Image: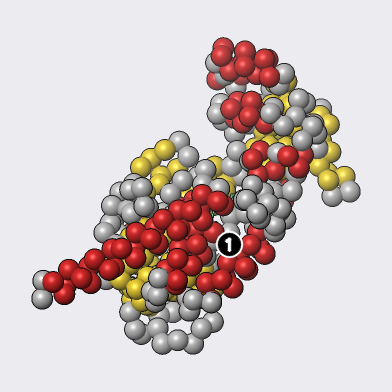
């Protein structure tokens, strides 16, 4: 923890030190802004050993990626604390309240708090998440290609997931679990058949694990299906508490409520930007890093113009 005096106002406080927050902090530090990152240290992809699809970093561990990011922002004097922001209030600036006690003042705010994945309540699913229970074929599909896949339905939208993962394996079984077959449209059924996806009705009761590997899916009727990978669609729960507190407008989507933002990530609250999974469930690491960059660049311009305008207007 940096021992700098925090009673002085920061130019920017970044809430969240994942890819989005660290990327914003890097750009802000390099633009010579006094910047503080407050990070609770629970990045979304922590359950995974490897991060895929980020050019030049494909296969790196998420923990190493973030450790490198923290090293990079430190080079430019950005401070980072392991803490949680519990509240934010605004007057002409912002007061950011920390869980450990105390508060800091800042002129601008980046909310990069990510989201939480709420998994279906099937025994074993949470424990195996990020290993052989997966949510995203772009993240993990290549590594498990051609294996026998199961897809655990959480709603009729799981048909889309079953169709998508058939790009990575021709052996896919969709377990309808608590979704009634009648909820699937004719087009769904025809597409599933065209993709060669088997559809199995009935509730999933648990997973079969042998030698710390998924080997099957067990239904409530006692039958088991040999599968070594299970895809499922967790319910994304965006961390919008701070934005709501500030009065930011949110947009309800089938995947949660996200702040209304402009192309730079500026929310409807002047001075407050958002980036990464805080603005959308499908933001991958590369998008989150890019969103953080974009927000930071906009903030640099915004701070400069407000300083110049204050000088111009006396
Ligand atoms: C299992 C799994 C595997 C994945 N694999 C890949 C992959 O291979 N490739 C890929 O591109 N994407 C992958 N993703 C998606 C990836 O996790 C996200 O794209 C990425 O984490 C988004 O970055 P972020 O900075 O928005 O959020 P996060 O990485 O989640 O970081 C948010 C940070 O904010 C902190 N925070 C939250 N609230 C507060 C608060 N109030 N105060 C302080 N700090 C707070 C959190 O603790 C966390 O450290 C995967 C996701 C999962 C679930």
Locate the N terminus and report the quarter of the image it occupies: bottom right
Ligand 1 image-quadrant field: bottom right
Check disc 1 and report its element: helix, strand or loop: loop
* Residue 312 sits above or below residue 45 on the image: below
Q: Position of residue 53 (x, y in %)?
A: 64, 47
In this orientation, which residue lies closer to the viewer: 51 or 192?
A: 51
From where the camera sits, is residue 108 visible?
yes
Describe residue 174's horizontal placement relative to residue 293 as left or right: right
Structural crowding at the residue carrying mark 1, measured as other residues with C-alpha within 10 Å and reported as few (<14), some (14–19) or many (≥20): some
Identify the residue at image location x=89%, y=48%: 211
Identify the residue at image location x=65%, y=54%: 56
Q: Position of residue 40 (x, y in %)?
A: 53, 67
Describe residue 215's horizontal placement relative to residue 244 as left or right: right
Q: Quadrant of residue 95?
A: bottom left
Q: Residue furthest right?
A: 211
Disc 1: residue Cβ within 8 A of ligand 1's nearest atom = yes
* Residue 171 sits above or below residue 255 on the image: above
Q: Which residue is mark 1?
A: 42
Identify the residue at image location x=67%, y=15%: 194
Q: Position of residue 124 (x, y in %)?
A: 73, 46
């Amino acid at each position: 923890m940096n021992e700098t005096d925090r009673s002085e106002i920061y130019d920017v406080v970044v809430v969240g030190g994942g890819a989005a927050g660290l990327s914003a902090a890097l750009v802000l530090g390099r633009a010579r802004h006094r910047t503080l990152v407050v990070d609770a240290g629970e990045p979304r992809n922590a359950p995974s050993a490897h991060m895929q699809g980020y050019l030049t970093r494909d296969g790196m561990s998420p923990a190493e990626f973030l450790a490198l990011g923290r090293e990079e922002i430190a080079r430019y004097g950005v401070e980072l604390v392991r803490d949680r922001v519990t509240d934010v209030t605004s007057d002409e600036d912002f007061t950011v309240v920390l869980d450990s006690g105390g508060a800091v003042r800042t002129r601008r705010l980046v909310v990069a708090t990510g989201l939480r994945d709420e998994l279906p309540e099937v025994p074993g699913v949470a424990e195996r998440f990020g290993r052989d229970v997966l949510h995203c074929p772009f993240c993990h599909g290549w590594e498990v290609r051609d294996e026998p896949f199961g897809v655990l339905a959480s709603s009729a939208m799981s048909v889309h997931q079953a169709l998508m993962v058939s790009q990575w394996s021709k052996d896919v079984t969709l377990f309808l679990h608590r979704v009634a077959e009648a909820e699937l449209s004719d087009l769904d059924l025809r597409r599933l058949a065209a993709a060669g996806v088997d559809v199995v009705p009935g509730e999933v009761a648990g997973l079969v694990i042998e030698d710390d590997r998924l080997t099957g899916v067990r239904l409530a009727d006692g039958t088991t299906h040999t599968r070594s990978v299970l895809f499922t669609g967790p319910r994304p729960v965006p961390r919008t508490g701070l934005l709501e507190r500030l009065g930011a407008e949110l947009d309800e989507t089938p995947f949660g409520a996200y702040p209304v933002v402009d192309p730079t990530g500026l929310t409807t609250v002047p001075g407050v930007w958002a980036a990464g999974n805080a603005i959308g469930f499908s933001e991958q690491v590369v998008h989150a890093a890019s969103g953080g960059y974009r927000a930071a660049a906009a903030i640099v311009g915004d701070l400069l113009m407000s300083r110049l305008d204050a000088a111009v207007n006396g």
